[in-house]
Image (tube, helix red, strand yellow):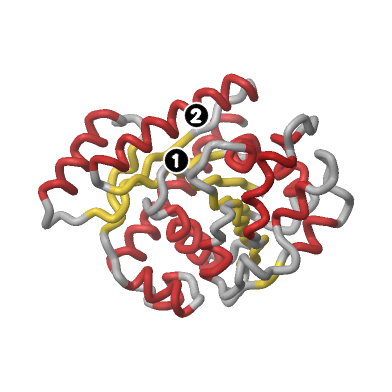
Amino acid sequence: MRIWAVANQKGGVGKTTSVAALAGLLAEKGKRVLVVDLDPHGSLTSWFGLDPDHVQKSAFDLFQHQGQVPAGLTRSLIQPTSCAGVDLLPASAALATLERKMIGVEGMGLIVSRGLAQVWDDYDYALLDNTPTLGVLMVNALAAAQHLILPVQTEFLALKGLDRMLNTLAMIMRSQRKAIPYTVVATMFDRRTQASVQSLNTLRKTYPDHLWRFAVPVDTKFRDASQAGVVPSAYDRDTHGVRAYRRLLDDLLAETMQVKAEAQ
């Protein structure tokens, strides 16, 4: 299983949309995909028609066993989605209470890794949607991740959030003593606005080695897909936004293949 975390320390930059879009496109390719909602707001959970305020089993259950994950627990929490080939480990609002509950618990940063290990052979990919807040949930996601996708809206304030996220990533890599490859993805790009164009140019100058070569445009069909409870490519497979995510996925898969080839 390959684990991709999608994160940024700013809300509203397209994290959940990126997870839903990439998951659907991976399923199109015949991959078995698990999407994991680690955000107490539960946007990904809501996308697939579940209410994070009332869901009975969720990622919160992983954190209730003093840093351990009982055998079989992860599989018992997973639910199917409207997209064949994509399953969901939902979020619940109770995730917001973890910070105070996990104080002093040994191994608290590795719980998601331990949980995913239980379903390692069940899926080809796991995509982790994250809260924008630095804390135990984001630490868990980054500890588990083999690749980090950083969506950043093409506007000034979102660029500041990216700086904070990269500082967090550097801190996690030092503490975990491992390198986490990452790809910055410009989202919500509107070529008609000067602010959007300038922000994209700033990203290209500042992060030339990590910025994806294209951008995901503004696409109202993403909102329509979430309201319908389906992945974007199932709602309309040929919108500008879906075509951009399809191109992004192809580049991510090509990078994965290159890394595997170099390791052999």
Query: Residue visible at 70% across and 35% down?
Result: 109
- Answer with the quarter of the image where residue 106 lies: top right
Residue 224 relative to residue 84: left or right: left
Where does the image place residue 110, in percent across and percent down from the top left?
72, 36
Q: Which residue is mark 1?
A: 9
* 164 up-or-down from 7: above or below: above
Query: Residue visible at 60% across and 51% down?
Result: 38
Asked whether residue 26 is in view, the answer is no
Earlier along the polypeptide chain: callout 2 or callout 1?
1
Q: Which residue is mark 2?
A: 168
The amino acid pointed to by label 2 is: Thr
Contact between marks 2 and 1 (CB within 8 A): the answer is yes
Query: Residue visible at 50% across and 29% down?
Result: 168
The amino acid pointed to by label 1 is: Gln
Residue 208 or residue 221, whichever sits in front: 221
Residue 244 relative to residue 69: left or right: left
